[in-house]
Image (cartoon, helix red, strand yellow):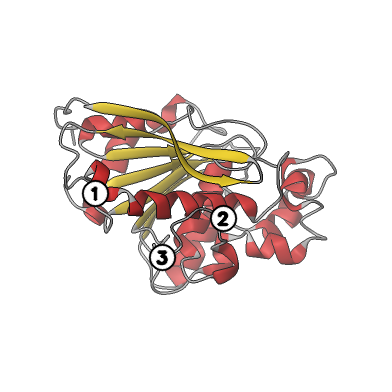
Amino acid sequence: MTVAAPAQAAETRKDLVFAEVDGQSLKLDLYLPDQAEGSSLLVFIHGGGWQSGNKSNCSLDWLADEGYSVASISYRLTDRAIFPAQIHDCKAAVRWLRAHADQFGYRTDRIAVAGTSAGGMLAALMGTSGDVESLEGSVGNNLDQSSRVQAVIDYFGATDFILRSRTQPSRANAVGSVSYKLFGGAASEQVELATLASAVTHVTPDDPPMLVLHGLEDQTVLPDQSQRIEMVYREAGLPIKLVELPGAGHGGGEFFNEANRNIVITFLRNTLGND
């Protein structure tokens, strides 16, 4: 399959404030396609171990050239707050985007969420926790809006921290590790938070379709994390596609080559529609 000739992105809106929390302005960047009216929306969540990175690291802004509106969002990092602050912020962004859809033209019933690494974990959790009150939070001024999404793309994110505490304790339990900072302690000790943060915990039959991409040589987030969400999704009878990249590690250009871009576009067209 070949990607159709791309449309030209029409406009980029930077640093739109979607919430104020703990003295911090949470912002997003919006990449609008030439025909924004009636377009589907993809919300992108950056990686960085929940402790670094920012919204300018948007790996999927090229989707604006394919006719999608793309919002790259910020969230509180672990130097500011531990979990569940991060998912509360992501859900606040989706609620803000729904509340402002008339201003920008995208559809509120065609929203996908995607993320890489730490962002992939948050994207998967966004998809499976639509009915989990404790993960909604009260960030932002649009609490009348839904935070649900209609599709998920998870690039090599952790989906089961209880499993990770067993198979990768150096990443989940060790003092100073990114998961330790996320939970304010080892995943093996902060069991309630670690369970709450695991997308596999919340899978229900009304969850959206999911696309997962993971490198088989990834030593930062082991492939068993993506294999686990695939298993739980399939057990629930939900649509999921796991793309395992032989020889690939934790990220890299191969995740965004033409073949894998085509997989993403096909997934979005099948789940959200052709625009």
Q: Establish if 110 lies above or below 191.
A: above
User: Where residue 144 is drawn, which disc sits there?
Assistant: 3
Q: Position of residue 122 (x, y in %)?
A: 54, 50
Q: Label 2 belongs to which residue?
A: 88
- Is 6 on the left or on the right of 168, as rendered? left
Q: Label 1 belongs to which residue?
A: 102
Determine the CA span between mark 2 and mark 3. 15 Å
Q: Nearer the viewer, mark 1 or mark 2?
A: 1
Disc with the residue nearer the chain's start (1 vs 2): 2
Disc with the residue nearer the chain's start (2 vs 3): 2
Q: Count residues near mark 1 (Cα–Cα under 10 Å), then give few for <14, some for 14-19, many for 20+.
A: few
- Is 34 on the left or on the right of 87, as rendered? left
Q: Residue at x 47, y 27 (%)?
A: 56
Q: Position of residue 84 (x, y in %)?
A: 64, 56
Disc with the residue nearer the chain's start (1 vs 3): 1
Q: Establish if 70 lies above or below 131.
A: above
- Whether residue 216 is visible to the viewer of this picture, yes or no, is no
Q: Count residues near mark 2 (Cα–Cα under 10 Å), then give few for <14, some for 14-19, many for 20+.
A: many
- Give the amino acid type for the residue marked by disc 3 in the picture: Asp
- Quadrant showing the C terminus: top left
- Give the amino acid type for the residue marked by disc 1 in the picture: Asp
Determine the CA span between mark 1 and mark 3. 16 Å
In the structure shown, which secondary structural element does the residue marked by tag 2 occupy?
Answer: helix
Task: Quadrant for residue 260, please give it.
Answer: top left
